[in-house]
Amino acid sequence: MLVPKGCLGKGPPDGKLAFFNWRGKVVRDFTVLAYDAYSEAFPEPFSFADPLAGVGARSIRVALECKKSGHLFVNDVNPLAMEAARLASQRNGVHGKMSFHAEEAGLFLAELSGRRERVDIVDIDPFGTPAPYVEPALRALKDGGLLSVTATDTAILCGIHPQVAFRKYLGVPLRSEYCVEVGLRLLLAMVVRKGLAFDMAPRPLFAHADQHYMRVYCSFELSASKANLAVGHLGYVLHCFKCGHREASPSAKERCGRCGGTMQAAGPLWTSDLHDSYFLKRMSASAREGPFLRFLTILDRASSEVGLPPYFFKLPKLTAALKSPGHSPSKVVEELSKIGYRAAVSSVDPQGIKTDASIEEIIAILKASNP
Amino acid sequence: MLVPKGCLGKGPPDGKLAFFNWRGKVVRDFTVLAYDAYSEAFPEPFSFADPLAGVGARSIRVALECKKSGHLFVNDVNPLAMEAARLASQRNGVHGKMSFHAEEAGLFLAELSGRRERVDIVDIDPFGTPAPYVEPALRALKDGGLLSVTATDTAILCGIHPQVAFRKYLGVPLRSEYCVEVGLRLLLAMVVRKGLAFDMAPRPLFAHADQHYMRVYCSFELSASKANLAVGHLGYVLHCFKCGHREASPSAKERCGRCGGTMQAAGPLWTSDLHDSYFLKRMSASAREGPFLRFLTILDRASSEVGLPPYFFKLPKLTAALKSPGHSPSKVVEELSKIGYRAAVSSVDPQGIKTDASIEEIIAILKASNP
């Protein structure tokens, strides 16, 4: 199902009235899997707030497809978009569990938190940066709630305008071949840090990305002591553009331990795991049941990443420098594992190798298996 | 006048109903001077929002004493406090220009911004950290508006709990003899950075502190390009606990340029001026007119600080190390000026010397003038 039943062919949305993102299908598919995984442990249906709902595609899918969806607060500042969403909800028979609002997103969320109608899940999916909406979203979240956040300003997160990244994401990005992973970690760190200021301790659950978006899922528990501990998961990814060495560090060190060159520091960003193993297992189980079998590859790769360093090595970049032909990523992972390293194919880049081996050791393997 | 006419003796506040901070008098005196200085250039009266108003002491003084005070939105989540404020406003004859609200502060501010009743000045004066209120306050501000922010968690800003400082103020503090100045710069940087995320470029106007509070005044102009430039005013204060050398730097360098020891980095914080010279001139002019003559010393010291580095040297600390008797701060400033350095007595510490001279040069002067 590309979009909610009846929401496209016969009724709204009309492109002239409000924005409907065709490319958002995969993101919405993952949303359904993630919310199902999150709510599995709940006895009660979960409440949901969608402050930047557009024509409501995500909300209607959550209402229709999530096993435990309860009341949904759907909001868009554009009343025409809300009319379209209301009509679509009626055609899909889910209008009974939805309320529609046409407020500025920050005010809508402040009303949920100020009047103590806090919800289990809030989703932030704006055009561009989500930075202005994260604080109000956290305020609208129940203790233990889940926040999902999409960024579509991927060029900023990948380091094209470092000042803008510093302003929106509270940290310095890194223009490198693994900028997508660094971008995801900057995005997550921004979300986490806004929570930490409210004594909300984070538990990152899942993150994914492609060229057009980066998206993180993180739950939060009210605990000042756990929030203090979480500060230890924020740090820097250091990269030496002279020799290609990279490392994670709690502070922004200046010298490369391998060649003595200058290290460029990205961060502060989230240096621990982007994914939670148990959460991924539950997402995979849901994916096997439904029409989402093709997502198992990404979920499996995400599982293999857990415990590995916060960066990857891009094979074509290494082989080009060696003037060697292409290598199979899974073969390289196998070779690294054989000699005792942990390694996995990156979930955000099929040509990316995540490993605790150093760049020398990877190059040695590439040379050894050079035809 | 200790508190607004009639607000204390005959009527509210009753300590049992709501909180009234006796120690807040000096802070409120400065507030009147600063708002007068800010609004001088305006042809129209300024609007004002006081989201954490308590029994309204500040709002009533602004209404009574500021030359151009217009409509005042007064809010406290405690309806009893608002009753006291309303009564006090009636006794003082200023209820006509005030509206009273009893909402959670974030919701109250979101309503101002969401319904486009944005105001010229917002004041944030909570018990403890102002961190959770700064974003909503910025949203409620008109383009070019002024935000004044008080922090009373001075121990956090002075580095007693660095993790908590990192969570609330987005940066690392420094436990040193000039921690008050570093704390002010961390507080300002937090306020500035939350504005930068909204493309709001800051203009710091005035900052002051004592043992119980730190307070900053900063105006904001909507401009993404100016916001990018402002990123350059954020950096680090580096301190060597081995030799006492200190410096400002755009990045967190590790080695002391003087003795090779390890530098401790505080920041990111605001490394440029805390005060605006022209603004201080206007505050001083108001102070000369009114009953605030005794504030001229602090305002004059603040003026002398402009252009000097973001730290100071505490005389008793230096003389104790030298086992020398006390020196007069103004005498040391004079000596430094004689040999071509810029120097001033710190506005936040009468024993603090701000100068572009190094610690060696200050010590040389102390030794030379040793009785």
Image: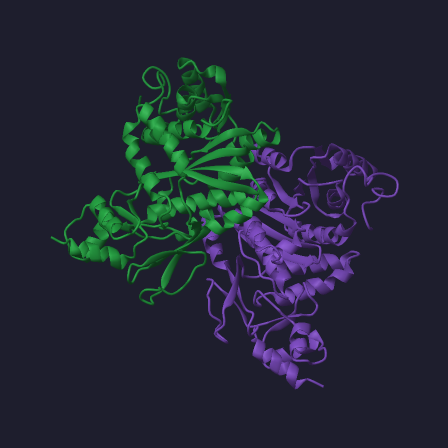
Chain colours: A purple, B green
Single out the residue that lies furthest toward the right. Answer: A10
Count every numbered label the image shows and give the total: 0
Q: Is residue B118 above or below residue B5?
A: below
Q: Nearer the viewer, residue B269 or A24?
A: B269
Residue A296: percent from the left, percent from the top? 73, 63
- Res. B151 visible in picture: no
Q: Is residue B10 above or below residue B151?
A: above
| Quarter of the C terminus of chain A within the rendering | bottom right
Q: Quadrant of residue A159?
A: bottom right
Residue B339: percent from the left, percent from the top? 25, 53
Q: Which residue is depicted at the point 47% across and 40% down?
A: B203
Q: Is residue A316 left or right of residue A235?
A: right
Q: Is residue A271 left or right of residue A294?
A: left
- Res. A180 visible in picture: yes
Q: Nearer the viewer, residue B54 or B212?
A: B212
Residue A192: percent from the left, percent from the top? 54, 51
Residue A79: percent from the left, percent from the top? 73, 32
Q: Is residue B91 left or right of residue A213?
A: left
Single out the residue that lies furthest toward the left. Answer: B371
Q: Is residue A228 above or below residue B60?
A: below
Q: Is residue A225 above or below residue A176?
A: above
Q: Which residue is depicted at the point 53% across and 47% down?
A: A194
Q: Nearer the viewer, residue B96 or B100?
A: B96
